[in-house]
Image (cartoon, helix red, strand yellow):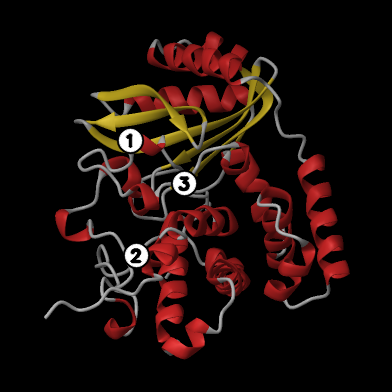
């Protein structure tokens, strides 16, 4: 006998992509975002059928629960990242159609790329308090009214308004680049060509004199643990890196919706580079080498490819099914121990 399908299942599963988009912007980690959404669904199916029927707006309920989960995660993230080996950079994302190139990704797992996921923007978000970040993202990016944001952060609407305002000032003081993507792509291309040619003069000309380069390896692969300051120093260091990596190929690629580069060794993505460009100069470079943060670029092992999903038979399954973990721990937590 066929098990009846929960008539509300379709509406619930259709929320997944929106929730992934919200949680990635709140956490800066795709692995953590997926876990937060997974936990949100688990709590939904932990409710009794009567409790679910009493919820007027499942969408609002899911958002509220996901937001609270993210708020809790953000509260512990700062201490966790203090134990992280080296610098911590948000997880870079490729274009939606190119996730896990070894196998097309579930569209529900993709993050919509816009200015709110640019690497420079995500780095600014990292400097905010958890409550500031949640209030700002939900109100300014996703346009949730402060009354709803207040239910998530446990404060008054007026307090949430002040939090969003404070976060807005942080973004404005960061003076994020307004350089058009077309111009950025040209500068990234020139940087790639100069780097491949080992042209110190050309690299220095493309870098702001006070430029900064930051690498994130999580202690899992080799990388400089401290930022490199100064355009000339960056140029010489990067030429040295290329000399120690024979066979390395550089490919222009969209990274978090912005022009970037991908380094590949023997066809395998080893580093993803994101750039902050102001005018005609590169101000900051973020190099993500932590393999746990490159899952969307490389494709995980077959055993790790199961997408998280809600139970096909609805509440009778008890809770959301959890996808297999890759390695002893997932995401950046393993490197933080």
Residue 144 x %, y %? 70, 58
Task: Tell me the residue at 35%/23% (across/down).
Answer: 250
Could you tell me residue 140's position as x and y percent? 73, 50
Q: Which residue position is annotated with label 1?
A: 98
Does dot 1 land on a helix, a strand or a loop? helix
Judged left or right of residue 99, residue 139 is right
N-terminal of the pair, mark 1 or mark 2, is 1
Q: Which residue is under mark 3?
A: 111
Q: Residue at x 39, y 44 (%)?
A: 289
Other residues around mark 3 within 10 Å, as few (<14) / some (14–19) / many (≥20): many
Q: Residues within 10 Å of mark 1 (few under 14, many from 20)?
A: some
- In which quadrant of the rendered image does the N terminus lie? bottom left
| Residue 219, position as x, y percentages in the image | 39, 55
Q: Which of the 4 quarters of the picture holds residue 150?
A: bottom right
In percent of the image, x 23 and y 24: which residue is there? 247
Which quadrant: the C terminus?
Answer: bottom left
Secondary structure beneath label 3: loop
Residue on which the image places disc 2: 330
Question: Residue drawn at (43%, 90%), measured in percent from left and top?
Answer: 48
Rendering coords of residue 331 (x, y %): 39, 61
Front residue (pair 316, 17): 316
The image quadrant of residue 173 is top right
First in sequence: mark 3 or mark 2?
A: 3
- Measured in 3D between alpha carbons, the distance from the residue under mark 1 to the one under mark 2, in whole angstroms, is 22 Å
In this view, 44 is above or below 166:
below
Q: Is residue 118 left or right of residue 1?
A: right
């Amino acid at each position: 006998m066929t098990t009846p399908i929960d008539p509300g299942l379709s509406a619930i599963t259709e929320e997944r992509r929106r929730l992934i988009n919200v949680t990635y912007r709140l956490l800066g980690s795709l692995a953590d975002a997926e876990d937060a959404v997974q936990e949100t669904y688990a709590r939904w199916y932990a409710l009794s059928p009567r409790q679910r029927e009493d919820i007027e707006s499942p969408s609002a309920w899911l958002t509220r629960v996901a937001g609270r989960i993210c708020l809790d995660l953000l509260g512990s993230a700062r201490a966790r990242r203090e134990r992280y080996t080296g610098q911590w950079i948000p997880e870079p994302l490729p274009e939606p159609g190119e996730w896990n190139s070894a196998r097309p990704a579930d569209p529900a797992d993709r993050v919509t790329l816009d200015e709110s996921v640019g690497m420079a923007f995500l780095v600014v978000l990292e400097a905010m308090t958890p409550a500031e970040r949640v209030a700002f993202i939900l109100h300014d990016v996703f346009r949730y009214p402060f009354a709803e944001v207040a239910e998530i952060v446990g404060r008054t609407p007026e307090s949430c308004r002040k939090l969003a305002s404070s976060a807005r000032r942080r973004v404005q003081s960061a003076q994020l680049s307004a350089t058009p993507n077309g111009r950025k792509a040209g500068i990234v291309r020139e940087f790639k060509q100069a780097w491949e040619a080992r042209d110190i003069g050309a690299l220095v000309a493309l870098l702001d004199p006070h430029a900064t380069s930051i690498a994130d390896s999580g202690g899992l692969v080799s990388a400089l643990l401290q930022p490199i300051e100064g355009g000339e120093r960056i140029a010489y260091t990067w030429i040295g890196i290329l000399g120690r990596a024979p066979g390395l190929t550089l490919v222009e690629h969209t990274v978090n919706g912005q022009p970037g580069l991908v380094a590949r060794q023997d066809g395998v993505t080893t580093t993803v580079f994101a750039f902050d460009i102001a005018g005609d100069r590169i101000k900051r470079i973020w190099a993500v080498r932590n393999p746990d943060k490159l899952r969307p670029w490389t494709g995980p092992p077959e055993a790790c490819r199961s997408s998280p999903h809600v139970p096909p038979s609805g509440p009778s399954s008890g809770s959301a099914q959890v996808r297999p973990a890759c390695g002893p721990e997932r995401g950046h937590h393993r490197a933080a121990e």
